[in-house]
Image (cartoon, rainbow, N blue to C red):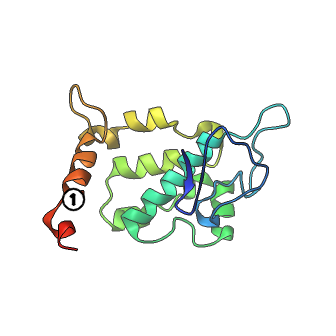
């Protein structure tokens, strides 16, 4: 499955010419704010997914959208050095966390972190241990939560 946002998903091999998604989670190239690809090179769906990942993470960390309206997003596209890091710092996000989000939300799709590079980012280091896959602790905690006694009482 390919996840675009929580409301829309599709199989990666399916090709659609119709843009679908929630505006706050769509990458700037999908909104037409920057040129992405050309006729001979299609849009990079994985780069757009990385943008969406950044938006999801930003909202989880701050409780607010990265860019409250399309005008703020357009301003960021024009001046990428104006990423809203202050909102992250105000919520206790580390320098590494801010760097991660900046790098998955770079306006230019070709410059964004790939999923593989994101997993190797310093902010992911606490999730890695020798011989384990990233996020194994998160998955273990999820399984513990899923099978808790509280769930079984319903």
- Residue nearest the viewer, comparing 113 with 39: 39
Q: Quadrant of the N terminus?
A: top right
Total marks shown come to 1
Q: Is 131 left, or right, of 5 in this rendering?
A: left
Residue drawn where x is 49% and y is 52% of the image? 53
Toward which corner of the image does residue 25 lie, by quadrant? bottom right
Toward which corner of the image does residue 88 lie, by quadrant? bottom left
Residue drawn where x is 71% and y is 53% of the image? 30
Q: Quadrant of the C terminus?
A: bottom left
Residue drawn where x is 74% and y is 56% of the image? 19
Task: Provide the residue designation for mark 1.
Answer: 145
Q: Is residue 107 above or below residue 66?
A: above
- Residue nearest the viewer, comparing 44 with 120: 44
Q: Position of residue 47 (x, y in %)?
A: 60, 42
Q: Position of residue 150 (x, y in %)?
A: 17, 69
Q: Position of residue 63 (x, y in %)?
A: 41, 71
């Amino acid at each position: 499955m390919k996840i675009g946002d929580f409301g829309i998903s599709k199989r990666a091999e399916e090709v659609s010419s119709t843009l679908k998604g929630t505006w706050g989670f769509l990458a700037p190239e999908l909104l037409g704010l920057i040129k992405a690809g050309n006729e001979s090179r299609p849009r990079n769906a994985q780069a757009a997914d990385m943008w969406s990942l950044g938006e999801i993470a930003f909202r989880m960390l701050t409780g607010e959208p990265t860019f409250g309206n399309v005008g703020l997003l357009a301003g960021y596209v024009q001046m990428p050095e104006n990423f809203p890091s202050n909102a992250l710092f105000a919520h206790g996000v580390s320098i590494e966390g801010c760097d991660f989000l900046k790098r998955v939300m770079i306006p230019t799709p070709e410059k964004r972190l790939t999923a593989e590079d994101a997993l190797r980012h310093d902010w992911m280091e606490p999730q890695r241990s020798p011989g384990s896959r990233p996020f194994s602790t998160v998955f273990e905690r999820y399984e513990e939560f899923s099978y808790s006694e509280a769930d079984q009482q319903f």
